[in-house]
Image (tube, grey):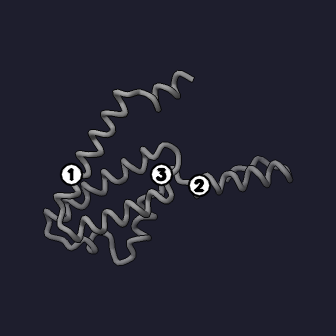
């Protein structure tokens, strides 16, 4: 129980996370408008699928900001980085993240295994 409170009710950590998030968003606002637009759309898309505490999605977003800043420095158009299928690009970013779809997948298998036998794993 202490681990739970340390993770979710640690005021110092919450404040640090909030400060870091604000710094990252300031970096986004410094990007060209087309990069900002694509980042915001990817961000909306990713949060629809975020599972758990969402910290893994934040880490992905911070990496995306790095990638976009590099693209700007190299004079690339944002779609040169993401490709025309931005949803597929976003799905690839989410591949290693804890998502609700993964949770639903696991729940489906557990429910079937519970009723029909088996271990209910992927």
Left or right? Give the position of 8 relative to 65. Answer: right
SS under mark 3? loop
Please, which residue is most extreme toward the right here? 116
The residue labelled by disc 1 is 26
Give the alpha-carbon distance from disc 2 to disc 3, as whole Å.
9 Å
Q: Is residue 66 above or below residue 35?
A: above
Total tally of numbered discs in the picture: 3
What numbered label is drawn on residue 97? 3
Location of residue 113 with respect to 87 vertically, above or below: above
How busy is the neighbourhood of tag 3: few (under 14 within 10 Å), some, or many (20 plus)? many
Residue 102 - label: 2
- Residue 55, disc: none
Where does the image place residue 71, in percent across and percent down from the top left?
20, 64
SS at badge 1? helix
Q: Residue at x 30, y 57 (%)?
A: 64
Residue 4 location, x and y as percent? 52, 28
Q: Secondary structure at mark 2?
A: helix
Q: Report the mark closest to the observer, 2 or 1.
A: 1
Image-quadrant location for residue 78: bottom left
**Which sits earlier in the primary sequence, circle 1 or circle 3?**
1
- Tell me what residue is drawn at x 34 percent, y 54 percent: 61
- How far apart, in angstroms, are the residues tagged by discs 1 and 3? 24 Å
């Amino acid at each position: 129980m202490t681990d739970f409170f340390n993770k979710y009710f640690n005021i110092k950590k919450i404040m640090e996370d909030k400060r870091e998030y604000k710094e990252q968003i300031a970096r986004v606002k410094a990007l060209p408008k087309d990069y900002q637009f694509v980042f915001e759309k990817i961000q909306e898309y990713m949060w629809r699928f975020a599972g758990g505490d969402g910290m893994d999605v934040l880490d992905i977003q911070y990496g995306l900001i790095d990638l976009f800043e590099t693209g700007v420095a190299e004079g690339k158009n944002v779609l040169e980085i993401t490709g025309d299928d931005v949803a597929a690009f976003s799905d690839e970013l989410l591949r290693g993240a804890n998502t609700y779809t993964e949770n639903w997948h696991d729940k489906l298998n557990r429910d079937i295994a519970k009723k029909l036998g088996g271990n209910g794993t992927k």
